Amino acid sequence: MRGGKPAIGPVFPRRRPEAHGLAYAASRPMDGGLGICDAGRMRSCSILVLAVLALLPRATQAAEPWQLWADDGNGMVPGYNPRIAISGERELFYSYYTPQDDGIGEVYRVSLDDPARQFTLMPGFPLPTPPPEASYANASALAVNARGEPVVGIAVNAGFTVTDPMLFTWDAEASDWIAAEIVPADEICTRLIRQVALAPNGDVWATCQWSGAYRSTDDGRTFEHVDVTAAVVASEPSYVPTRANGASDLGALFGLVIGPDGSIYVGTESGGVVYSDDEGATFRPLDQDPTNLMSTMARATNSGNIAGVGLTLDGKVIVQGAAGQGAYPPPGPIGVYVFDIAAQTTDVAVGLPDYVFNGLTVGQIVTLPSGRIYMHSTHDTVDTMTGRPTFGGIVSSDDALTWEVDNAGIDEAFMIPTMGTWYDGNGHGQSHPFATDGDDIYVATSTGKIFVRYGEPGGGTDTGTETGTGEGSDSGPGPDTSGGALTSGSSQTEDGGGASSSGRDDAGQAEGGSGCGCRSREPRGHSAWAVLAVWLAWHRRRRRAA
């Protein structure tokens, strides 16, 4: 929290669009390119646009606009799928998934109390060597431990090559990174660490694709493998084959959130959501009647590719994933559900287009002490071929059931003339961009910027937890990485299909699930990463020239 300090504006003013050196939206017409606005009809056009906006669903009106907090003037660098984490000592750590071409991992740090907000590059750490056809990946997950030191999850970035090393922890006393020891040594994650989160008792948890989880009781120096599938089967032997797709295990563990009471919730590839209320000693399904095909909690079992897991302030579980292959229940309109474990009831969320969410779309769900809930749609806010406004960016809710677009103050879309397409830094590849400090929430964009929305001065403390990419949950003792917010562990998420089949396809350099023929996304004219790669190459040449 900000200790009662008044909210302040950005130290560095936002750059003009043309300062990017690209054909940005400076010439974008106010009608989004529909051709109805010109100099002779500007007054009538303004009235028309306002009338149209009045008919649209509530958008960007949830709270005060986002404010630019840091950019390249503060030493920020752009990167695809950024993630941030905030320690109890009010240090913000920043990293990203790609690009990384020299095999040395990068994490940046800055104090929230630094008036200049100047980022410093920390010493690097060695990344695992990817297969010949793949490039290096940087950080796939980022959190802090109880000492306020960053813990980084690593990805091998392609295939099923063993990710070794797979977790690095910063040792503040030695001013260097420690490659965490894995116990037993042969239980090394393949592909990547999906999420990292801090528990109230100081344990650090990490989830893997593929497979299982890891728990550290010594601030991330050593991680012990936890076979979550075996733990669930021990409590409910009939849980496999799974109802989502008939798999013999839970598959990849994509989602992770730890509540203020220490309960651990895991979103899985093939087995819905499972949890532990005894600090990981046992795990069980959310559905207390998982063999009943008509159970009121059937969707908690018959779902897969779940990376988005969060909690409301009163302990209900928010889940975003893909419908499994079972006949019941019918999929909800946007694939977001709220489960009440005590009452064994399911509520279905509404308010967004029905094409938005599929498996592995959301990687982080954040609940502030005020009760406001945030997640990122990982959809662009403009059509990438025309630049016209479309649904995308950040969404928020007061009850986890009715959601609305919430991008006011953030406009990171620009055109790349050499490709004839648009890129949105607040769009695709933003699965885990949030970090919180009390009721203040920060969001990173892939264009190398951080925006902030300030809450009430002296906002809530230690009343919540976090789920998803960027930071770990940490209510209770130790540093408040979530700042009292509820948010999922740090996660890396890409496009995925429905609940994955037990056969695991190689998804290339992205790390999405293998899919099961469930509802999938529309094809893109250019992949977001291909577009960003062009812009990043230009941006880095400009920095070197300077």
Image (cartoon, grey):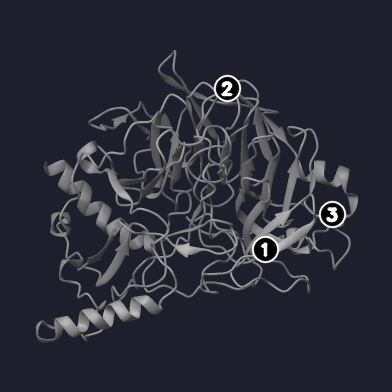
* Marking on residue 188: none
Point out residue 278 in the picture as x, y percentages from the top left corner. 77, 33
Foreground pick, 523 / 300? 300
Q: Is residue 165 visible?
A: no
Q: Amino acid at mark 1?
A: Ala
Separation (CA) of disc 1 from disc 2 = 33 Å
Point out residue 371 in the picture as x, y percentages from the top left corner. 54, 48
Q: Is residue 278 visible?
A: yes
Q: Quadrant of the N terminus?
A: top left
Left or right for 146, reference 536: right
Between disc 1 and disc 3, whose residue precedes?
Answer: 3
Q: Are marks 1 and 2 in contact (CB under 8 Å)?
A: no
- Which residue has dot 3 on it? 239
> Is residue 491 shown above or below 185?
below
**What is the quadrant of residue 524 in the picture?**
bottom left
- Which residue has dot 2 on it? 221
Would you call the spot at circle 3 few (<14 residues within 10 Å), some (14-19), or many (20 or more)?
A: many
Separation (CA) of disc 1 from disc 3 = 16 Å
Q: In the displayed orientation, state which residue is furthest to the top.
A: 173
